[in-house]
């Protein structure tokens, strides 16, 4: 099953967004609003939506625009031109889905909300390039194994949405939450509620593509979204999932994937998760990551805001669990202390390039 939308009026000419899945997709009322709204806001252009649109989604779009406009100087509120569609009557019972990449946050939501969740949603084309068939298959096989172990039906989605935003919007900062919302709305014939696993803890929130204040604003009359997991730090999430055989057998957290590796064990995200697992005494149990942490590799990273947040959480978790490791503590402390300097340097460089 597949659905498509064509965007007109952008500098590059018409752009086609394609989504396919192993379940029915409904590309009608309101489904394409999240995918197109940030792009129109970036261009500062009127958004004209073809066909009748969901009235609840249109009403909520005002809140989306207000929030994004207040967060980002390069996204401006725009006019949406559309025709409102009567709210459809839905008699059949539908399921509850949770987005599932195989990472720590998605495993945490899948386990914590297991009694509610009926489906896990795995998307190819978000963190893995839709054209990388070999890695996509590895990740999909892992997701299938995890879903089977957890007793959930796996919704398998493929899309080029991320490609369509490249060069226009930053994926993490501006767009990935909107892309998740479009996929969730397209699944409205199958799911009535969709859980979006949290990226950050409540105490560490900042403007980001998926956020507790933003995700539910993508609600329509047929699908509601729930941001979940922000009350637990990443070390707390990993401690919870470390008790799950499914997570320890199928955890996939790498985004660099050199040479098509499922987890490289060398990138910042891999190593930070390995630290999480070591703190709770489960690193050796995880079948998808190395048993040893490369401290020198950890010290080589240029820390960004997000990685500094997780480094600080790991330092606090080490104290809580009584873990004494001078080298690891020094490396994590270095990341926390130097992150503001790297952020300042990047800000200055961007200002110079804009002149």
Image (cartoon, helix red, strand yellow):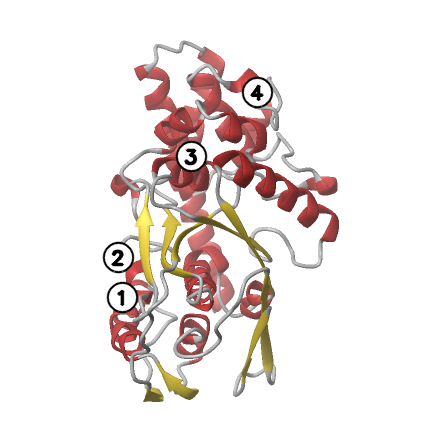
Tell me the residue at 33%/82% (across/down). Answer: 78
- State which mark lies toward you, 4 or 2: 2
Helix or strand or loop: what does disc 3 sit on? helix
Pointers 1 and 2 in contact (C-beta within 8 Å):
yes
- Mark nearer the viewer, 4 or 3: 4
Does 345 sit above or below residue 5?
above
Foreground of the two, 25 or 169: 25
- The tag earlier along the polypeptide, 3 or 1, is 1
Label 4 residue SS: loop
Q: CA distance from mark 4 to mark 3?
A: 21 Å
Vertical placement of 354 versus 44: above or below? above
Mark 3 vs mark 1: in front: 1
Q: Mark 4 or mark 1, which is nearer the start of the sequence?
A: 1
Dot 3 or dot 2: first in sequence order is 2
The answer to whether the residues at label 4 and label 2 have Cβ atoms under 8 Å apart is no
Pointer 1 with pointer 4, Cβ within 8 A: no
Residue 144 at least partly seen: yes
Find residue 293 and name its label. 4
Q: Within the image, what quadrant is residue 61 found in?
A: bottom left
Of helix, strand and loop, which one carries label 1?
A: helix
Q: Nearer the viewer, residue 225 or 165?
A: 225
Return the residue nearer the eye: 160 or 226: 226
Q: Reading the chain from its start, which is encountered first: label 4 or label 3?
A: 4
Disc 3 to disc 1, C-alpha distance: 30 Å
Which residue position is annotated with label 2?
213
Residue ID for mark 1: 67
Q: Nearer the viewer, mark 1 or mark 2?
A: 2
Q: Are marks 3 and 1 in contact (CB under 8 Å)?
A: no
N-terminal-most mark, 1 or 2: 1
Q: Residue 114's x, y, as percent?
A: 38, 39
Query: Residue 11: x and y, percent?
Result: 56, 83
Classify mark 4: residues with Cα within 10 Å, few (<14), some (14-19) or many (20+). Answer: some
């Amino acid at each position: 099953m597949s659905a498509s939308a064509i965007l007109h009026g952008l500098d590059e000419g018409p752009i086609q967004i394609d989504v396919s899945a192993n379940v029915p997709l409904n590309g009608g009322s309101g489904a394409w609003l999240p995918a197109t709204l940030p792009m129109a806001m970036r261009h500062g252009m009127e958004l004209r939506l073809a066909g009748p649109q969901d009235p609840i989604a249109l009403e909520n779009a005002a809140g989306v625009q207000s929030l994004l406009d207040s967060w980002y100087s390069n996204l401006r509120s725009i006019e949406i031109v559309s025709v409102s569609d009567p709210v459809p009557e839905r008699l059949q019972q539908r399921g509850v889905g949770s987005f599932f990449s195989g990472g720590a946050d998605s495993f945490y939501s899948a386990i914590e909300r297991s009694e509610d969740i009926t489906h896990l949603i795995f998307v190819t084309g978000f963190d893995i390039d839709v054209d990388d068939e070999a890695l996509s298959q590895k990740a999909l096989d892992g997701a299938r194994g995890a879903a089977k172990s957890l007793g959930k039906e796996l919704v398998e989605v493929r899309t080029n949405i991320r490609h369509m935003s490249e060069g226009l919007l930053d994926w993490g900062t501006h767009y990935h939450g909107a892309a998740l919302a479009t996929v969730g709305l397209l699944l409205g014939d199958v799911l009535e509620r969709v859980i979006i696993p949290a990226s950050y803890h409540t105490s560490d929130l900042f403007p980001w593509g998926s956020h507790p204040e933003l995700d539910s604003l993508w609600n329509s009359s047929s699908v509601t979204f729930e941001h979940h997991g922000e009350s637990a730090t990443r070390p707390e999430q990993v401690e919870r999932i470390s008790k799950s055989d499914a997570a320890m057998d199928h955890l996939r957290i790498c985004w660099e994937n050199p040479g098509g590796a499922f987890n490289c064990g060398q990138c910042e995200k891999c190593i930070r998760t390995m630290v999480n697992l070591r703190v709770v005494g489960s690193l050796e149990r995880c079948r998808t990551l190395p048993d040893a942490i490369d401290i020198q590799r950890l010290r080589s990273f240029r820390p960004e805001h997000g990685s500094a947040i997780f480094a600080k959480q790991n330092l606090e978790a080490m104290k809580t669990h009584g873990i004494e490791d001078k080298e690891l503590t020094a490396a994590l402390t270095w990341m926390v202390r130097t992150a503001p300097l790297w952020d300042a340097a990047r800000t200055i460089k961007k200002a110079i390039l804009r002149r």
